[in-house]
Image (cartoon, rainbow, N blue to C red):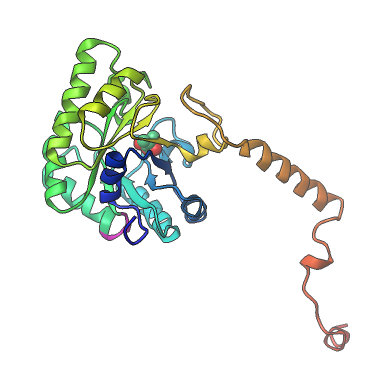
């Protein structure tokens, strides 16, 4: 698309052309490089970093500094995909100026092309202000993990009429505010379909069924590397857990049995130099 890079306009074009958008999360340089080379359209440096990389029980503990550290690494690995930085808990909840300043840091320091904010009406003034600062914003509705304590756990959202209406209204509010896409997380498939049909901007589903305009998964889930908790909506395309464990056991065994390192892994020294050392 255009210069080959996937951009905000590519998101909208994909929706208009009926082409599905592929997204994954990434947190480090070498993984981001592989995912980009494989052709993924967009990478999210998700605050899921807190759980899958840092080992916390939810996403609430990561800071803007933590996120920017990882955004920098991901940005360095990517040539084509649009990189989006996830604004963490409390980085856009206090006041508008604080939110815009934090979003700006993602762009200036983190090198990302846009940011994602969770929530609808509660944060709409911050979303508008960040967009006014010329920073592309992706919305996120449904199960917004930063609200885990309000929801009382990681639960499907929008099964009841009132909840579902709120998600629909919020999606329209976000679209009106100017977000370029909205992540719908853990909502019933037919609700996600309805929202996708109502919106001009693309929806990106995670646990939202088949009819969203694109899909995102946490890379460690998709690759079968994070097994603390595997949600129902995850499809594991690899079993890297087993691959990593098997490779590591073989490495340990070969060290113990003297098979590694072999001659081809070793460096030479001239005989004459060596003689003088004895
Ligand atoms: O933090 C994250 O990884 C996310 C995706 C699951 C959408 O927000």
Q: Left or right: where does residue 210 sit relative to residue 104? A: right
Q: In this rendering, does residue 9 appear at all?
A: yes
Residue drawn at point x = 35 percent, y = 48 percent:
67
Q: Nearer the viewer, residue 128 or 205?
A: 205
Q: Position of residue 251 (x, y in %)?
A: 76, 49
Vertical relation: 110 (above or below) 42? below
Residue 143, quarter of the rendered image? top left
Q: In this rendering, does residue 152 appear at all?
A: no
Q: Nearer the viewer, residue 41 or 197?
A: 197
Residue 24, quarter of the rendered image? top left
Q: Position of residue 158 (x, y in %)?
A: 28, 17
Q: Main secondary structure of the magenta part?
A: loop
Residue drawn at point x = 33 percent, y = 21 percent:
187
Residue drawn at point x = 50 percent, y = 55 percent:
37
Vertical relation: 59 (above or below) 231? below
What's drawn in magenta, residue-wise?
A: 108-112
Q: Quadrant of ligand 1?
A: top left
Q: Residue furthest top?
A: 160
Question: In the rendered view of the protein, which quadrant contains the N terminus?
Answer: bottom left
- Residue 105 magenta: no
For the image shown, how many numbered marks are present on the structure?
0
Vertical relation: 88 (above or below) 39? above
Q: Position of residue 278 (x, y in %)?
A: 88, 82
Q: Position of residue 239 (x, y in %)?
A: 62, 35
Q: Left or right: where does residue 72 sit relative to residue 147? A: right
Q: Residue furthest front?
A: 17
Residue drawn at point x = 30 percent, y = 49 percent:
10
């Amino acid at each position: 698309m255009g210069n080959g890079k996937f951009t905000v306009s590519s998101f909208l074009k994909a929706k208009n052309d009926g082409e599905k958008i592929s997204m994954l999360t990434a947190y480090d340089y070498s993984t981001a490089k592989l995912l980009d080379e494989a052709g993924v359209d967009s990478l999210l440096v998700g605050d899921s970093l807190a759980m899958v990389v840092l080992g916390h029980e939810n996403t609430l503990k990561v800071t803007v500094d933590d996120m920017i550290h990882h955004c920098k690494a991901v940005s360095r690995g990517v040539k084509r995909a649009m990189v989006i930085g996830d604004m963490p808990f409390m980085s856009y909840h206090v006041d508008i100026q604080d939110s815009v300043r934090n979003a700006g840091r993602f762009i200036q320091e983190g090198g990302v092309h846009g940011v994602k904010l969770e929530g609808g009406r509660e944060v709409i003034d911050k979303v508008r202000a960040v967009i006014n600062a010329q920073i592309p914003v992706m919305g996120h509705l449904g199960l917004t993990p930063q609200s885990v304590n309000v929801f009382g756990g990681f639960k499907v959202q929008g099964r009841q009429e009132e909840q579902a209406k709120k998600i629909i209204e919020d999606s329209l509010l976000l679209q009106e505010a100017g977000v370029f896409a909205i992540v719908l997380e853990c909502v019933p498939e037919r609700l996600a379909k309805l929202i996708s049909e109502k919106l001009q901007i693309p929806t990106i589903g995670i646990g939202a069924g088949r009819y969203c305009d694109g899909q995102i998964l946490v890379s460690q889930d998709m690759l079968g590397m994070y097994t603390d908790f595997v949600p129902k909506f995850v499809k594991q395309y690899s079993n890297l857990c087993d691959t990593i464990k098997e490779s590591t056991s073989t490495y340990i065994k070969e060290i113990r049995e003297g098979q590694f390192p072999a001659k081809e892994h070793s460096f030479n020294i001239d005989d004459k130099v060596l003689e003088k050392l004895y």
